[in-house]
Image (tube, grey):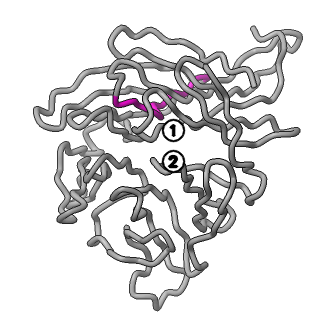
Amino acid sequence: MIANFNYDYLHSPISNGVVDDEFIFIHHDFDEEWRVYKSNLCDEYYDAGFDMTLLNNPILFDWNQNDELLLNEISTFQVWRVNFDGTNLVKITNNEGSYRGPQWCLNDSLIYCVFNPYDSTHPLYPGKIILMDRDGEIVYVFPEGIGKVSSAIRGDKILTGANHTGIFELGYILISTKEFISMKEFDITQMNGFGLLGYIWLNDEEIIYALHKQAARKIIKLNITTLEETLIMEEDCENVGSGVSATFPNNQEEVLMSRSEYRYVANHPDSLYYFREIIKKNIVTGEEWLLDIDL
């Protein structure tokens, strides 16, 4: 039961792999604030950053070692970059199409994303995975079937997927050669209704990916060399949804997860209310802690 209920969402934790235990997140209270904040796992500080209300329904996708953010506007799916503190806000795409899922890569010099041209005569119509530079110029186009909007970048590897002969392959692209290395195949017809929800790097040798089917979810750790798998979490509840959002290079046991949940609220026994929060989870012991973020 929640005694003091209000629409106060905390979500989208992202780490940049540079500062130990540091991450950014979004605070959205619907009445006053929709802003990016910076903190760490010890809750030692909360630094206020970019004001999300300056854009039209933005989605925060990435944060790099130079303290720059990448965002999409969901009304137009154009890409913006901005410093964490809100300075140097720049739209880097040119309205020739929609750009989805932008991620920094190659030491923050390139951006991986999906490009869907509006013009049916465009050579990349109806859409391809691309690399573009910091100013939105396309520098490489991946072959048909290689790459998905869901991605995670680590060093010279882009964790993503590919479709070949009806099979979804989870793997990574080597940025240096643009080669796709398949790690695991998913035959949708053999997955008992489960679908792949998302994935993230834990370290150079391990990833974490999620499967979902209606209310059921599984979160699994996979070694990319041995292909050994470990079940991290399993839940089956219509009111709760979890997904790993941030990992830390110096901490191989604890991850941050976004959690959405419907709950009954004190003094409102007949209604379910929607919450979005950030939890810290130990993927070895299974323990969880709700982050006590007090802005």
- Residue at label 2? 63
Determine contact: label 2, label 1, CB under 8 Å.
Answer: yes
Density class for disc 2 (Cα within 10 Å; few <14, some 14-19, many ≥20) is many
Q: What residue sits right under mark 1 in the picture? A: 14
Q: How many marks?
A: 2
Q: Is 284 above or below relative to 86?
A: above
Prevailing SS of the magenta stretch: strand
Mark toward the start of the polypeptide (2 vs 1) = 1
Decide which of 143, 271 is in the foreground and name it: 143
Q: Is residue 193 magenta?
A: no
Q: Residue at x 49, y 12 (%)?
A: 288
Residue 121 in the image, given as x and y percentages of width and height:
46, 91
Q: Residue furthest bottom?
A: 121
The residues bearing labels 2 and 1 have C-alpha atoms spaced at a distance of 7 Å
Q: Quadrant of the C terminus?
A: top right
Q: Quarter of the image for the N terminus: give it.
A: top right
Q: Is residue 225 above or below residue 233?
A: below
Q: Percent from the top left, x then y, of residue 249?
A: 34, 31
- Based on the displayed image, in which of its 4 quarters is residue 177 positioned? bottom left
Residue 106: numbered disc: none
Residue at (72, 55) in percent of width and height: 57
Name the residue type under label 2.
Answer: Trp
Is residue 49 shown left or right of residue 167?
A: right
Say above or below: 84 vs 275: below
Q: Which residues are magenta?
A: 239-249
**Left or right of 20: which side holds 165?**
left
Q: Picture coordinates of residue 90 (x, y %)?
A: 63, 67
Q: Looking at the picture, which amino acid does disc 1 mark?
A: Ile
Of residue 186 and residue 146, the one placed in the foreground of this image is: 146
Q: Tell me the quarter of the picture where residue 95 sits.
A: bottom right
